[in-house]
Image: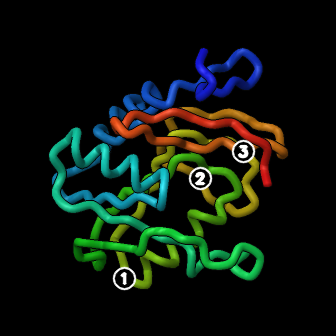
Amino acid sequence: MTDSTPTTGALMLDAEALYQTLARQIERIRTPETQFAGITSGGAWLVQRLRQDWGLGPVGTISTAMHRDDFAKRGLAVTAQTQMPFEVDGAHIIVLDDVLYTGRTVRAALNEIFDYGRPASVKLAVLVDRGGRQLPVEADIAAARLQLAAGQSLALARAEDGSFSFRLKPSK
């Protein structure tokens, strides 16, 4: 085990292996018309990697900064701007994120998507569903499902070579 591989009980999370699992699961549901968008930053990293691995056309990046319900507390974080380089109206979109927790980031991402148009469908794919939902949001695809203590946070990291790892740290 390395310092970047968190454990929960006896569970070890290998971010690279989970990425491969997630890619296989997405491959089963994608069609030639499917568009992809990743939530900044971990989800955007995942969708960029899929684009590279699969030779996809342009993919989207979704910033949730302007739709967060904790904007007054968090302020405007330095984050990438939303880019949707495809027609959102009528599109079938798979949104990627690294960790699904309360559902609030996904809610903000959906609001941001609808600022660009009305998609035909949106599916959510995540590396890890850690439970603890505060909103009725469920991932269509999750490479792993686990429970973390309320005082813990799981974050995806990306190395210079593009490989993924996880950091387990105390929540803020």
Q: How is the image coloured?
A: rainbow
Q: Answer with the quarter of the image where residue 28 lies.
A: top left
Label 1: state its secondary structure.
Answer: helix
Label 2: state its secondary structure.
Answer: loop
Q: Amino acid at mark 3?
A: Ser
Label 3: state its secondary structure.
Answer: strand
Q: Residue at x 52, y 25 (%)?
A: 14
Q: Amino acid at mark 1?
A: Tyr
Q: Residue at x 61, y 78 (%)?
A: 76
Q: Amino acid at mark 2?
A: Glu
**Depth order, front residue of 101/71:** 71
- In the picture of the structure, the residue carrying the numbered disc 2 is 138
Q: Residue at x 30, y 75 (%)?
A: 88
- In the picture of the structure, the residue carrying the numbered disc 3 is 153
Measure the alpha-carbon separation of dots 2 and 1. 22 Å
**Depth order, front residue of 81/136:** 81
The C terminus lies in quadrant: bottom right
* Mark 2 and mark 3 residues within 8 Å of each other at the beta carbon: no
Horizontal relation, residue 3 to residue 33: left or right: right
Measure the alpha-carbon separation of dots 3 and 1. 31 Å
- In the picture of the structure, the residue carrying the numbered disc 1 is 116
Badge 3 or badge 1: first in the primary sequence: 1
**Depth order, front residue of 123/161:** 161
